[in-house]
Image (spheres, rainbow, N blue to C red):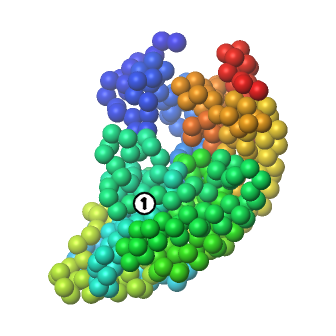
Amino acid sequence: MALTNLQVRDLETVLHPYTNQATIRDTGTLVLERAKGIHVYDVDGKPYIEGMAGLWCTSLGYGNEELADAAYAQMKKLSFTHLFGGKSHDPAIELAERLKEKAPVPISKVFFVCSGSEANDSQIKMIWYMNNAMGRPQKKKIVSRIKGYHGVTIASASLTGLPANHTDFDLPISGILHTSCPHHYRFGLEGESEEDFATRCAQDLEDLILREGPDTVAAFIAEPVMGAGGVIVPPKGYFEKMMAVCQRYDVFMIADEVICAFGRLGEWFGSSALGYKPNSISIAKALTSAYMPVGAILIPEEMYQATIVESKKVGTFGHGFTYSGHPVGAAVALKTLEIYDREKIIEKAAAKSPQFQAHLKALGDHPLVGEARGLGMMGALEMVADKRSKKAFEPKAGIGAKAVAIAQEEGVILRNLGDALALCPPLIISPEEIDDLFDRVARTLDRVLDHVTAEGLLTA
Ligand SMILES: Cc1ncc(COP(=O)(O)O)c(C=O)c1O
């Protein structure tokens, strides 16, 4: 199909993030114009269910007047002041107070950033800073996981355990280590129970720490449920066992809750949903339901104390962004938290999760789906060439991208993580809309099955 004028102008001017720059020149982009509730509309007025809440972030959906009003009111009152060198403002103070109240573990201070990548970058810097202040300058290595996703800045992309984020970007940087991925379907051994697999993952972490030297390993960072790595729910008992290893070697545990916080897994924090207690937490995305780019790290007392020690030594705490705690972002975040509380968004998300997960698991019977996995209001359908042997399609067949294109025709926006189709709708989705979403996903899978059958790509 010929590209429209807007699509051509787009391709001539915009370098699209996370996009195959070669194929997009033929397919063009989907240009969206407006949105309401769980639907986004393209420039021709066609509606789509936003099945991925944007990028796992628009929990309250679109067109929320209260959030728009909160931003407008703050812009008129105090559009900007920073938090550097002794300045502050009401919205940042109040937001920090609210986040401390909500945090699932004891938190001393909140450090504001503008994105998930900045949050995790700041976590690494804070860990290094803290261990210098504590007189253990050799304890600096950070362990993340194969397939973990923590962002794209130089340090956070190094934490990320996905090849496309490293290859030819000359990453990861030194001092970042990757331990095993807790995906039982792909990495569990024949006959190995989830529990035994979790034990093996914890053993891998322990072996890595011992190999590197416990005195050199500072922290372990993990998402409660891996998002961009494929929506991977850890096996039963996983975090309990990983935590025990971290505690044994005095390794700080960072929960990257950039996706999981604020109800995605049915509780305020994903770490609570999975029953573990990290030392510090990264948040972003649903903190403002993506109405403004705001993130934060929630840090414990010992990390805060380090900033005092270092300030006395260096003369200042030399870290912070112009827009750390931006008043408009903070006002929108405060309003978002108010709506989560008042509308019982988290409780309602928990109540809708069984319906969402039942639909998802039912699609596990589809001939194309090797594994249907998920927790709370997120999930993935991994498409395979052979259900029995779990054989994947050849990456160059581009089945995931094909499925996303078909889903778009069916009026639903999904994201493919390899050949896994991810689902993560706005938390405000109604039970009827959940049914509608999965009807469209089922039709998409049927059409992809027709395609792979016609192309002879199934090996079963
Ligand atoms: C768990 C996790 N951490 C960090 C990030 C990076 O966030 P950002 O894209 O805002 O830098 C993401 C983004 O999807 C994420 O899912």
SS type, badge 1? strand
Q: Position of residue 55 (x, y in %)?
A: 53, 47
Residue that extends furthest to the top in the rendered view of this protein: 2
Mark yes or no: residue 299 visible. yes
Question: Would residue 103 appear left or right of 378 to someone viewing this image?
Answer: left
Q: Quadrant of residue 197?
A: bottom right
Pick whichever, 16 or 48, lies toward us: 16
Q: Position of residue 349 (x, y in %)?
A: 71, 59
Using the rendered view, name the quadrant where residue 299 is placed. bottom left
Question: Is 97 drawn above or below residue 193 in the view shown?
Answer: below
Residue at image position (32%, 69%) is: 125
Q: Is residue 90 visible in this depiction of the protein?
A: no
In the image, what residue type sits under mark 1? Leu
Which image quadrant: the C terminus?
top right
Task: Determine whether, in the image, residue 323 is placed left or right of residue 457.
Answer: left
Answer left or right for 320 relative to 435.
left
x%, y% of residue 207?
Answer: 51, 67
Q: Quadrant of residue 390?
A: top right
CB of mark 1 near ligand 1 (< 8 Å): no
Number of on-image labels: 1
- Residue in the image at 37% along x and 41% along y: 167
**Image position, residue 273 (x, y; %):** 67, 68
> Which residue is identified by label 1?
177
Position of residue 131 in the picture relative to residue 239 (left or right): left
Q: Residues within 10 Å of mark 1 (few under 14, many from 20)?
A: many
Kindly identify the residue that appears in the image at 43 percent across and 76 percent down.
214
Identified at 73% across, 45% down, the residue is 372
